[in-house]
Image (cartoon, rainbow, N blue to C red):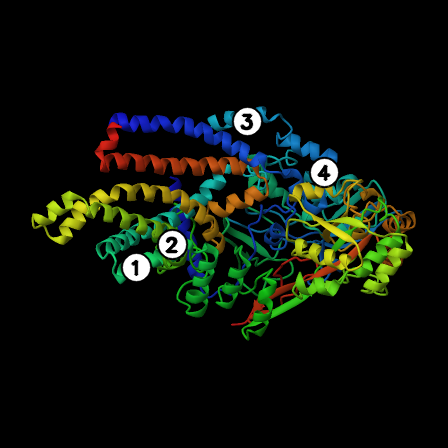
Amino acid sequence: MKLMKALLTATAMTFAVAGAAQAKTLVYCSEGSPEGFDPAPWTAGTSFDASSRTIYNRLIEFAPGSTETVPGLAESWETSDDGMEITFHLRQGVKFHTTPYFTPTRDFNADDVIFSFMRQLDKSSPWYEYAPGIAWEYFDSTGMATAIKEIVRVDDHTVKFVLTRADATILATFPMDFASIVSKEYADQLDAAGTRERLNTHPVGTGAFTFVDYQQDAVIRYQAFADYWDGKQPIDDLIFAITVDPGVRQQKLVAGECDIIPYPNPADIEGMKANPDLTVMQQEGFNIGYLAYNTRQAPFDKPEVRRALNKAINKQAIIDAVFQGTGQAAVAPLPPTSWGYNDQLVDDPYDPAAARAELEAAGVSGLKMKVWAMPVQRPYNPNARRMAELIQADFAAIGVEVEIVSMEWGEYLAQSSALDRDGAVLLGWTGDNADPDNFLAVLLGCDGVGSNNRAQWCHQPYEDLIQKAKTTFDQEERKKLYDEAQVIFKQEAPWATIAHSIVTMPMRNSVQNFKQDPLGIHRFVGVDKSE
Amino acid sequence: MLRFALSRLLLVVPTFVGITLIAFLFIRILPGDPVLLMAGERGVSPERHAELMAQFGFDKPMWRQYVDYIGQLLQGNFGHSFSTKRPVLEEFMARFPATLELALCAIVLATVLGVAAGILAAVKRGSWIDQATMGTALVGYSMPIFWWALLLIILFSTSLGWTPVSGRIALTHYFPSVTGFMLVDSLLSGRPGAFASAVHHLVLPTIVLATIPLAVIARQTRSAMLEVLGEVYMMTARSKGLSPSRVIGLHALRNALIPVVTTIGLQVSVLMGGAILTETIFSWPGIGKWMIDSISRRDYQVVQGGLLLIAAMVMLVNLTVDLLYGLVNPRVRHV
């Protein structure tokens, strides 16, 4: 029976594909397999590219190629004067996808918004643990779980979020992937059938592309949604051809088997730039790689010692050797593409003689220290061991002896958080959303000491500024506060800011209108392909 | 023969129990906390950490976790992936046909070419043919798979355009999976060109995966053949006036095959190792890459279940080889 069913489906699909033989298809050779297609429980960008950015929408969206927010499924929204309520006015006439496993009977409305958030908030909901071990990591870690008091259905197209605290950063989390809107009607259908786990394998959204099929670790197929509220996409079919090895991705692009690829090998970029069939886009990544001193331990408790060491680091040499040119020296803890970035900051000059003199002036001589090198590769640090070796050589030049330590990644993350950690730690961060708070408070605020604040740095004047920014709703005012906070950061130097990566997206010349996203999202809304 | 088969079957039971223990301990001995690895740079509060550890049962004593695991296994439950939250058996079964298809093609290629090359080298012992064959086998044996695969891709796919770079079938061919074996599914689909495309996509990964086993089988066949060719009964066969092809094909090869069959059996486990790299390079959606990812994520249930299922497959192959060995060489049945 099962075989018969599969054969019938095969026949139906064969005809469907034959009919679409002339369809315009874009092939994106993605770097890995998605964990699933319900964006809320996952944390990997690979899963978001395959789910939230293709199949789903959010109330508020990031504008393509920007960290600016624009209306999504909410046409407008307003925050109450006391900052305790956010009211969303929903777009009308938005359709959910019709698929072989679901036919919607109504348009998107307030019930879908409430369901999408409450399944992550309400522990008594059967959806809270709809698959074994499922967890709502981003909903919890962004503070959404504690910020929402209740969600009120004002009418079919108006939803009010009542908050537990006034927090200007909450609005920045609405365009995040976990806040994607799923269909309540579809969820009810799955509930009735006792197949809730299919929400994660057979997705239904309102996004620009409808999910067609996933062959594990091989291919994900989508079709442009004809009734998409913002108009049908220029391409007809979108294919994610999962290609794990970056060298092979490059070969497939050159051979014309892929139209666009992410994360090429830095060593291959120059060759691809020279290829007349390819276009190579580059943009600063929304990330920061840093060396965090333990500001609770002598002599790193003195800002003048930290500043002196920072002057001994030759960042350009690191960018050349570790990033092979695909990096940019970091001045501030925020990437330059953030709206909160203070472009007036001046970086510490690379000046070993001054560094040596300042160390002596601070009464430090014969210093021995540890530098921790991450055992994994990250966009903000493609080779931490090499980076540590370069820093070791730089510090040796000013008479500081460095011992490089490394350990298994889980241990590294745990032990580098310890208050009494011995040595300076190489680590980094990629922004979750466009809000500067996601860098300046999460990584350097007093609440993060003993966890994400690897410098264990709690400096009251800085803390007062970022806390004030949290409750300031005017963006210009917030920007001023963050500018000031970054000036203090630079004076106090809890980190040596090393680099922001440069993200490269090579594609065939036939790909049109692709916009590189500062947050590292890969999405294909509006992308076209010439014949 | 029945007693021999039963004795071999009985050996499977303790081996299997041993494997469950090794699979269980192996991943836990490695340093690394799955919850911390999942959280990454974002970190996790101690309370949330404890909550998640309890949710996955990692807070229980080791012996208790093992007992629970065995209990699950006896009910046919291999657990759920920590990462994707899907049943391990379902994930394995979705990927295993791809690995099996590739491994079968590779072992067939390695056996056919390896045995032929080994016979040729033995018959032409000392000639340039012998030296060239064995030299090539040595190069093949020492070839780093990753480098070899990329070299073939650059030559045959990018420069000459003869073969696709990676994947199992051209993206234009789309039909649902019925058996999981692309060669079979492409035939069932009835789509013109689908089967040819599937074969086309198999060429390079098969060559890469077959390279090392081919070299081993060729060398083993040569040495077994040389040993047999020097036996007195071979001289008798020749002196009886039998044709050289009958002497080599029937008398020599049949006796030489005994150690070769064992070697082929052993190469199956080598293929599993080679499949990890081959699958990664050729974006082949099999179990090799899946296992590697699971180890780096400390996805305990997947590693345990995956190892156990792979071990079961290898044991099945070894058992078959043992039985075949008994058939080929009646003397071992009485040992």
Chain containing the residue with disc 4: A
Q: Are marks 4 and 3 in contact (CB under 8 Å)?
A: no
Nearer the observer: mark 4 or 3; the answer is 3
Alpha carbon separation for disc pair 4 and 3: 34 Å
Residue in the foreground of this view, choosing between A425 and A177: A425
Q: Are marks 1 and 2 in contact (CB under 8 Å)?
A: no
- Furthest-front residue in view? A366
Nearer the observer: mark 3 or 2; the answer is 2
Q: Position of residue B65 (x, y in %)?
A: 57, 27
Chain containing the residue with disc 2: B
The reply to the same-chain question for discs 1 and 2 is: yes
Nearer the observer: mark 2 or 4; the answer is 2
- Label 4 sits on what residue type? Leu
Q: Which residue is mark 3?
A: B66
- First in residue order: circle 1 vs circle 2: 1
- Mark sitting on residue B131: 1
The reply to the same-chain question for discs 4 and 3 is: no
- First in residue order: circle 1 vs circle 3: 3
Chain containing the residue with disc 1: B
Nearer the observer: mark 1 or 2; the answer is 1
Q: Quadrant of residue B137?
A: bottom left
Q: Position of residue A248 (x, y in %)?
A: 51, 60
Q: Secondary structure at mark 2?
A: helix
- First in residue order: circle 3 vs circle 2: 3
The reply to the same-chain question for discs 1 and 3 is: yes
